[in-house]
Image (spheres, rainbow, N blue to C red):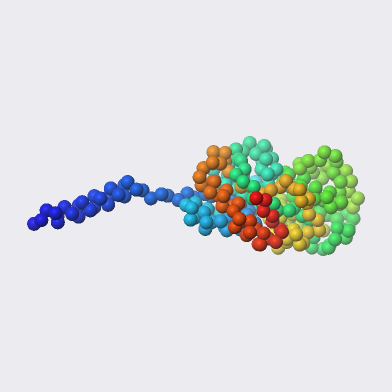
Amino acid sequence: MHLSRFFAPIALASALGFATLSTPALADTTLRIGVTPVPHADVVNFIKPQLAKEGVNLEVIEFNDYVQPNLALDSGDIDANYFQTIPYLEEMVKQHKLNLHILVSVHLEPMALYSKTVKNLADIPNGAKIAIPSDPTNEGRALKVLEHAGLIKLKDGATLLSSPADIVENPKNLKFLELEPALLPRALDDVVAAVINANYALEAGFNPAKNALALEEKTSPFGNVVAVRENDLNKEAFQKLKKAITSPEVKKFIEEKYQGGVLPVF
């Protein structure tokens, strides 16, 4: 019996075992990102394949309100979110003492006034009921849209935290219905008009560039951002997310898909 024939399989097994121990496979990173459906989920799902090639798997979790995504991020239930404007994030951080920071600004969704019953601002009747968002900053933002349209005037020094109580001129005696932003498109069956965030407007089949009675000013500071916890800002997976979501391919995707209803800001 040749000893070499006996020891060869053992040597081979040992070599394979050593190779396995010395070169462990690199595990992919999974990031759980909270989004609202349109356009945020669309954009994130668009970049999923590219990030997967780079070892970052995105788990997309959809929300239908503007409060839970920040609370879930702060508590660690998700790793990032992408749904909100800079002023809204700043106000939420202040109110709830959250440790959240901007990773990158991605796009602008023009807030606008919509109606199913009137075609022009001049056709809005006296005493008409107008629905507006009830959450901080978005309510003040909606009132700015109405002021820019000439329907109301706010007091001097009015901020993004303004409410209907800050209206000093209301020539049409408009009545205001404050609702959760997600409910505004459905409210159009019960009110003359509503000021709606573009993500919910797009989801309901409206395009700010084509269907709005009035648009907010083009100088709006309300870019939509990806937010993360402070400790994650410089981690490799989050930097890959930042690069992917501001790529030329994403810019082209936004411009072609939304036709002016969503505007890239990078």
Residue at 54% across / 38% down in the picture?
231
In x, y percent, where is residue 170?
88, 48
Residue 77 placement: quadrant: top right
In x, y percent, where is residue 218?
76, 51
* Count of picture labels: 0
- Looking at this rendering, what residue extends furthest in the front direction? 248
Q: Is residue 172 left or right of residue 143?
A: right
Asked if 216 appears above or below 76 in the picture, the reply is: below
Can residue 212 be seen at all in this image of the molecule?
A: yes
Asked if 151 appears above or below 165 in the picture, the reply is: below
Residue 227 placement: quadrant: top right
Question: In the rendered view of the protein, which quadrant contains the N terminus?
Answer: bottom left
Asked if 153 appears above or below 261 in the picture, the reply is: above
The residue lying toward the viewer, choosing from 182 and 14, is 14
In x, y percent, where is residue 152?
86, 49
The residue lying toward the viewer, choosing from 204 and 44, is 44
Asked if 235 appears above or below 263 in the picture, the reply is: above
In x, y percent, where is residue 261?
71, 58
Can residue 83 be seen at all in this image of the molecule?
A: no
Q: Is residue 187 left or right of residue 254?
A: right
Residue at 79% across / 63% down in the picture?
116
Residue at 74% across / 53% down in the picture?
111
Residue at 66% across / 43% down in the picture?
89
